Amino acid sequence: MTCTHPAFVLRMTFALTLATWLVATVCAESAVNAPHYEVDASWPKPLPNNWLMGQVGGLAVDKHDHIWVNQRPHSLTDDEKGAVPNPPARTTPRSLCCKPAPSVMEFDAEGNLLQAWGGPEDPGKCVAPACIWPESEHGIFVDEDDHVWLAGNGPTDRMLLEFTREGKFLMMIGGAFDGPADSNSKTSVGRAAGIFVDTPRKELYVADGYLNGRVVKFNASTGAFIKAWGAYGNSPSDAVPSPQPPDPKSPTFNRPVHCVVLAKDDLVYVCDRTNNRIQVFNRDGEFQRQFVFDPATLGNGAIWSIALSPDKDQRFLLYADGENNFIRIVDRKSGEALSTFGRNGRNAGQFHWVHQIAIDSRSNIYTGEVDTAKRMQKFVPRM
């Protein structure tokens, strides 16, 4: 039956108008609340010395707004590093370009390479047995003293390394050895993924990792163990990583425990990557809350890396999702998802396995990709 009574039409018109206004208001608020970004396709500038970058294992921004990368030279294919002879099969270069860059690279905000050191291309920076370079470069962090901290997720990578910004070796925690997970170790890590240093308190937080299932904290001056914890603040667990599907209610971290970030209000944010969740703790490892995003995501999981906005209250949490290949912006207090940008693809502004995210004091976002993408990108905030 069709109703055409004038009062009915008036009520329906008012309801539709109100609904339209509410939607428009919500959209307008979202547009105001969530920052918008566009890619700077000219960043970074071409590398000197015929160098080429491999997979971006780690990415960080220091207090000078310089961008630091811990990249993987060994991830370049033979054709990518064609300018390097490969004996015994090939004693002359295959092609004119290119050569692997050193593992640690420092860029300025304009995309200029300022320096590069370490890794298989610069072995003098790390001499065994005092210093052992990781098999697979992963996390990087530059603390307030301009010390550079590195980790690795290779099969025998059980170390954390500390250098000056110029690459002078300072300290190693752990070493290189094989063996099972040991989430109760007080002297080493297990294929660690993420690093954060609280310089004033001399505390080194580690997302540990691809083998161990914990967050661990060391004294950043001495390397001494402070404490460790697992999911929900439980005791660390060496339980074998669970198969798919992911479990956002799991009492243990799955592998990898992929990132750790300390906020200005002393909350610690941890990437439980393949459980598709961010768990939040205080500095003593006491569980506060968790955020779950896209819980049905399979494969390599949804929560890969976290950055916090540089405003006084760090209002926004941004995370890189390397399986769905976008950056999501979240209200840090409420956990409300505000917006995303990016998608799977090879063009500028798109991603393939976006592995790392970092942010500078002007809210510029930097990302790093692994697998076959092997690139960094810069995203600039726009009104």
Image: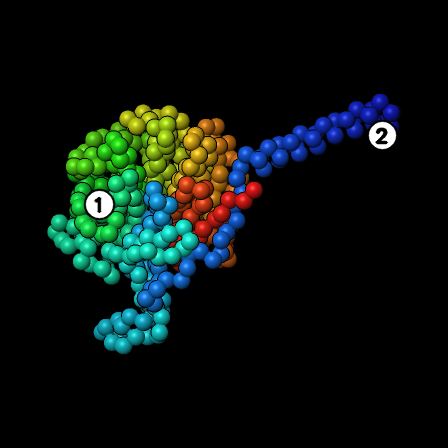
Disc ID at residue 162: 1
Residue beneath the point at 42% across and 53% down: 110
Disc ID at residue 2: 2
State left or right for residue 254 relative to residue 222.
Answer: right
**Residues at marks 1 and 2 touching, judged by CB atoms closer than 8 Å:** no
Q: Amino acid at mark 1?
A: Glu
Query: Considering depth in this image, is 379 or 4 the residue closer to the camera?
Result: 379
* Residue 205, percent from left and from top: 27, 36
Residue beneath the point at 20% across and 31% down: 226
Upstream in sequence: badge 1 or badge 2? 2
Residue beneath the point at 25% across and 44% down: 147
* Residue 138, percent from left and from top: 30, 49
State left or right for residue 124 relative to residue 260.
Answer: left
Q: Reply above or below: 49 against 370.
A: below
Q: What quarter of the picture does the C terminus occupy?
A: top right
Q: Residue furthest right?
A: 5
- Tell me the SS state at disc 2: loop
* Residue 201, percent from left and from top: 25, 31
Q: CA distance from mark 1 to mark 2?
A: 76 Å
Q: Quadrant of residue 74?
A: bottom left
Q: Amino acid at mark 2?
A: Thr
Query: Considering depth in this image, is 168 or 319 the residue closer to the camera?
Result: 168
Q: Quadrant of residue 212?
A: top left
Query: Considering depth in this image, is 8 or 13 the residue closer to the camera?
Result: 13
Q: Is residue 143 visible?
A: yes
